[in-house]
Amino acid sequence: MVRAAVPVPEPEPEPVRDWNSLGMARSSGGVLCLLLLCFLLLVLALALAVRLKPCDLAGQLYILDVPKSELPLWLCIAEFESRFNTHAVGQANADGSRDYGLFQISDRFWCSPPNQTEYYTFNECNVNCTRLLTDDITMAVQCARLIRKQQGWTAWSVYGQFCNGTLEGIDECFQPQTPAGNRSCAESESVLGDCS
């Protein structure tokens, strides 16, 4: 008995994607638009990262009851840790941990990282690390104060190399400003001869 060959159904071909219905054209113009969109998103992300000016940070720290005598150290730490960037997240450290915010606070010991980690986190500051990335520096300062209380200034690796010597004063940050050229009264007096 001869068996009749059973026809094997052929697999259905993949549907052809209609790129135009997705808002994308196959032409180089569509690729160019996509690249432009990516570039604009990158620029937007950079624009949202706030870099404080040293005197602005000094003023905010002073409002948060940091003594004036300590301000140069706080400014030095912020400058060399994050370049005054409130949204800075450091590269992964050797143990996989990351450092967050203005004072680059470690998620290994001081804050809770936004994602699961393969290492145990202590979260001594009892704060999510993302709260250290806001323009309101209150949580970052509170956590940095706790770190300093427990470990001193040497908790920051930049302290020994950059911040343990003679630091620039911050007196100019607290001088009254004049409307003309934003010079302090003392500077204006030498230029204009009168400060009234």
Image (cartoon, rainbow, N blue to C red):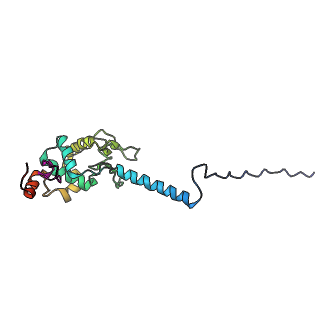
Q: Main secondary structure of the magenta part?
A: loop
Residue at the left extreme?
A: 193
Between 131 and 57, the residue placed more toward the observer is: 57
Q: Position of residue 18 (x, y in %)?
A: 64, 51
Please give left or right for residue 147 compared with residue 22 in the image: left
Q: Position of residue 166 (x, y in %)?
A: 12, 58
Q: Which residues are magenta?
A: 172-184
Between 134 and 122, the residue placed more toward the observer is: 134
Q: Is residue 182 magenta?
A: yes
Residue at the bottom extreme?
A: 28
Q: Is residue 186 magenta?
A: no
Please give left or right for residue 52 compared with residue 2 in the image: left
Q: Residue at x 31, y 49 (%)?
A: 50
Q: Position of residue 169 (x, y in %)?
A: 13, 54
Q: Position of residue 167 (x, y in %)?
A: 14, 56
Please give left or right for residue 153 compared with residue 29 in the image: left
**Above/below status of 118 relative to 192:** above
Give the mark count.
0
Q: Residue at x 28, y 51 (%)?
A: 51
